[in-house]
Image (spheres, rainbow, N blue to C red):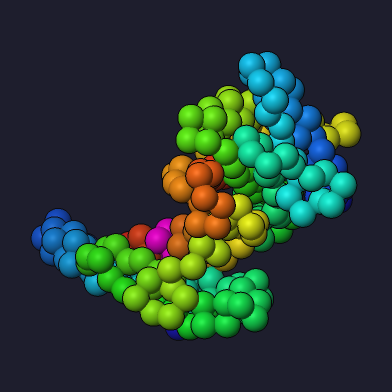
């Protein structure tokens, strides 16, 4: 039996996640936005924003015996004043946790919390705080 | 010519074998965990070599593994070593997460799962 495995690009995955996060952040009072890490055309504001990056997981999918590159990790880092930083992490978590990510005609498993880097003062930008959360899913 | 083999088991033998299982399991699992911790550390260190760049040239050498208990090991950058405390794993405002440990765990997690299963099999069939 031949099993066709459809794969997607990192850009498509990160666009789908940014859409989810920005839809949630738009419901907050104030200007809060999520941006793709390292994209020069998607520059974040000075504070109170979220940076998103995605990675393929080398272990692959359990469903396919660990052979396919269909497992993903998404990291999102909130940057801002302490209260806003916590709020951004919580709202992004609400947008992602147990939610399926749709890319084209593919729908992921529910995103599962993996780990967290607690909110702390940023080393380089005085007065700003930052924290990170990581989720994993299979697409 | 006919060859016949007759094997006889008794409840006493079963009892004797069963009483040895905890010790055999402890010895085998300790070895499995030590091996996986060492391999996980090697993998994470390799990823760190790729991702740390010139400004983190000492970071990969900060990786080590150590026992925290008979069945608990940890590996990763040691803060007491040069650059061991750098925020590469989860990144920072100025750099994305490197995920060196997370990537190694993706591989080692699956391997450890298989090794534990094999070790349990060995108790009864090995």
Residue at image position (72%, 20%) is A26
Task: Report whether residue A40 is seen.
Answer: yes
Task: Report whether residue B36 is seen.
Answer: no
Residue at image position (52%, 83%) is B58
**Is residue A16 shown above or below B113?**
above
Residue B55 horizontal side relative to residue B35, left or right: right
Quadrant for the N terminus of chain B, please. bottom left
| Residue B123: percent from left, percent from top | 31, 64
Residue B118 horizontal side relative to residue B99, left or right: left
Quadrant for the C terminus of chain B, please. bottom left
Q: Main secondary structure of the magenta part?
A: helix
Magenta run includes residue B31: no
> Considering depth in this image, is B45 or A33 the residue closer to the camera?
A33
> Considering depth in this image, is A104 or A124 the residue closer to the camera?
A124
**Is residue A35 shown above or below B38?**
above
Residue B69 horizontal side relative to residue B106, left or right: left
The quarter holding residue A138 reads top right
Residue B89 horizontal side relative to residue A22, left or right: left
Farthest front residue?
A: A126
**Is residue A90 shown above or below B119?**
above
| Residue A19: percent from left, percent from top | 78, 30
Residue at image position (58%, 31%) is A88
> Considering depth in this image, is A78 or A6 the residue closer to the camera?
A78
The quarter holding residue A65 reads bottom right
**Is residue A51 shown above or below B97?**
above
* Bounds of the magenta segment: B114-118
> Considering depth in this image, is A80 or B46 the residue closer to the camera?
A80
């Amino acid at each position: 039996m031949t099993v066709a495995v459809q794969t997607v690009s990192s850009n498509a995955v990160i666009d789908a996640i940014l859409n989810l996060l920005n839809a949630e952040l738009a419901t907050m009072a104030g200007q809060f936005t999520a941006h793709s890490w390292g994209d020069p055309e998607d520059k974040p504001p000075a504070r109170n924003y979220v940076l998103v990056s995605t990675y393929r997981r080398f272990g692959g999918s359990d469903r396919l015996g660990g052979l396919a590159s269909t497992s993903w990790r998404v990291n999102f880092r909130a940057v801002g004043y302490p209260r806003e930083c916590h709020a951004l992490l919580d709202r992004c978590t609400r947008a992602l946790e147990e939610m399926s990510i749709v890319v084209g005609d593919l729908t992921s498993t529910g995103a599962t919390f993996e780990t967290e880097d607690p909110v702390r003062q940023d080393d380089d930008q005085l007065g700003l705080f930052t924290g990170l959360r990581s989720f994993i899913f299979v697409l | 010519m006919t060859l016949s083999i007759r094997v006889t088991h008794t409840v006493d033998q079963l009892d004797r074998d069963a009483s040895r299982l905890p010790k055999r399991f402890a010895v085998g699992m300790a070895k499995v965990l030590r091996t996986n911790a060492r391999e996980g550390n090697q993998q994470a260190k390799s990823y760190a070599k790729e991702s740390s760049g010139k400004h983190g040239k000492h970071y990969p050498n900060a990786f080590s593994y150590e026992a925290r208990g008979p069945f608990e090991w940890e590996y990763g950058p040691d803060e007491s070593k040069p650059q061991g405390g750098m925020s590469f794993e989860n990144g920072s405002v100025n750099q994305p997460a490197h995920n060196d440990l997370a990537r190694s765990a993706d591989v080692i997690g699956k391997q450890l799962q298989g090794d534990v299963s094999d070790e349990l099999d060995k108790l009864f069939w090995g």
